Amino acid sequence: MNLRRLQHFEALYRLQSFARAADELAITQSALSRSLQKLEEELGAVLFDRTTHYVRPTDAGDRLIRPVQDVLAAAGNLDSAANQLTRPGSGTVRVGAGPYPMNPLLTRAIGRFGAAHEGVRVTVTGGTADVLLQGLVDRSLDLVICDISKFDGSAYADEVVVTALPREPLMIVTAASHPLPEGRGRREAVEQRPWALPRPAPGSEHRFAPAIRTRIAQRSFPDYELDSTLACLEVVRQGPAVTVVPRSLGLAASLDGSLTCYAMAAGEQTNDGIHLLRNRSQSAAVTAFVKALRETAQSVVAAG
């Protein structure tokens, strides 16, 4: 079976547009159409319903897409392995990351990995859980690092293998110019402050006080929803807002005296893990990067 035709099928399935798929593949629409017709003839099945208004996969196309994605991923790993025979240290690791492990875990892991694997390219994609999961399943990402609870209830949970990372305590952070009161008044003060946070993970509502859980249910929390913990810290520096970050990030960010960190209740910790597709072969570069992530996570927690 022609690998190029499988690539054409995967692109059209994903984009559901001859124009966009042909543009991505750098071929003409007529060439793409001929390629798919030959693939359908070879398989003896119609893979797409085509009209002048839309292109939609048939049941046969839906059944074929996962095996095709596996074949293309394996071919990519083979190309990477072949390149390393003549160019040791080459290849690409495509990482998806949620906001909490992005800093400092992922940034430090990239530094550790890069020191031992010069020439290997690392790309990082941030985003919401559904986007990251889809990227993992579509084979556009090699691994995803994020809160385990974001994948536990997903439709793809059976396809994902999760390795939990060491947990790190979470800390409340405020501007040094807007400290929290001591004692029992602290909890009430925190509830009344504006919050700067990435989108709360599904199932994390129990971490918050009842008043905030009500706001989460009403979709009015947080007050400032940002993509990264570093952006949240910058908002906090400017005024009365509060945020929650891993201890290592909070302590590092407060070294200049502009921020103050407060311990949260015992048991309030990160819940991150490395997510890989089950039964998918991994390149040597991806395997080495996963090892660097685990070692970095252990060192971050130990240093705290």
Image: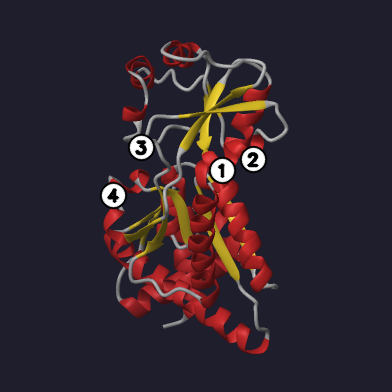
Q: Residue 252 carries which label?
A: 2
Dot 1 falls on a residue whose secondary structure is: helix
Dot 2 falls on a residue whose secondary structure is: helix
Q: In this view, does 162 lie to the left or right of 77?
A: left
Density class for disc 2 (Cα within 10 Å; few <14, some 14-19, many ≥20) is few
Mark 1 and mark 3 lie on one chain; the one further toward the N terminus is 1
Q: Is residue 187 above or below residue 38?
A: above
The reply to whether dot 2 and dot 1 touch (C-beta < 8 Å) is yes
The reply to whether dot 3 and dot 4 touch (C-beta < 8 Å) is no
> Residue 106's spot in the image, x, y percent?
57, 53
* Kind of residue at badge 3: Gly
Q: Is residue 143 above or below residue 197?
A: below
Q: Residue at x 67, y 24 (%)?
A: 237
Mark 4 and mark 1 lie on one chain; the one further toward the N terminus is 4
The reply to whether dot 4 and dot 1 touch (C-beta < 8 Å) is no
Whether residue 228 appears in this view of the structure is: no
Per the image, the residue denoted by label 4 is 155
In terms of depth relative to the viewer, which is nearer, 67 or 121? Answer: 121
Density class for disc 3 (Cα within 10 Å; few <14, some 14-19, many ≥20) is few
* Kind of residue at badge 4: Ala
Q: Residue at x 54, y 65 (%)?
A: 292
In terms of depth relative to the viewer, which is nearer, 294 or 276? Answer: 294
Q: Residue at x 59, y 48 (%)?
A: 104
Per the image, the residue denoted by label 3 is 267
Per the image, the residue denoted by label 1 is 248
Dot 3 falls on a residue whose secondary structure is: loop
